[in-house]
Amino acid sequence: MALLLRKLDRRSRWMAEAIATWLPHGDAPAPALHDFIDEQGKVSVWAVAEDQSNLPRVVAAIAATRESADVFDFVLFDGQAVSTAGARLEAAPGNSPDRVADQEWHRNLANVSAQRAARLVCAAFVNGERDRTSPKQIVELLLEAVNRRWLKLDDLKAGVKEKLQRTAAEKA
């Protein structure tokens, strides 16, 4: 099964180095649960190929929904964790302006109870790969997405659009 990407709202919840001294092996810090909780029992994730060939496009699709080209933190974890936790993976269109990415790679984790969320977070925390994309990298990914026509500049939020236009003008 493919890897799954979940955006992290606060990287500090996932910093293993800061809590390694007291956290039992196989467990995760409770604040990390915030990144896997949703009022409807669904959690938005993105399927990423094992070779991560679609990762730049997925990150660009998510970044295209944001107000600014800020740092982007995420965790990649094995999709098998979903069934192991007792949750379901559903194909569901995302809300990014990259319609192809939305249709092909966006998923929802469904039936995510408190216990299932805890199992998912532990699996992602223990076995997942946490990563960070810098603002400069975000701008480059978005410029590439616009150049490849995965995204339209006009579909981006004003702050992101202005940053891309400034960067493109500086490069010209």
Image (spheres, rainbow, N blue to C red):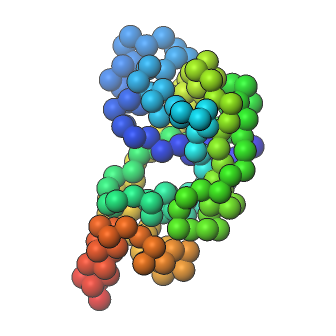
Relative horizontal placement of residue 62, taking residue 108 as reference (left or right):
left
Side of 4 where 15 appears, left or right: left
Measured as percent of width and height from the top left, residue 32 is found at 45, 27
Q: Residue furthest bottom?
A: 172
**Residue at 37% in and 67% down:** 157
**Location of residue 150 in the rendering, given as x and y in whole percent from the top left corner:** 55, 74
Residue 31's image quarter?
top left
Q: Quadrant of residue 1?
A: top right
In the image, residue 165 sits, relative to residue 17, either above or below, namely: below
State the residue in front, 65 or 128. Answer: 65
Is residue 77 in view? no
Residue drawn at (40%, 40%) of the image: 9
Image location (x, y in percent) of residue 10: 36, 37
Is residue 44 in view from this perspective? Answer: yes
Please tell me in which quadrant of the rendered image residue 8 appears. Answer: top left
At x 39%, y 58%, the residue is 66
Q: Residue at x 74, y 30 (%)?
A: 83
- In the image shown, does 8 or 154 lie closer to the viewer? 154
* Count of numbered marks: 0
Question: In this orientation, which residue lies closer to the viewer: 105 or 75?
Answer: 105
* 112 with respect to 6 (left or right): right
* Residue that protrudes farthest toward the front in the picture: 40
* Image spot of residue 73 (x, y percent): 41, 45
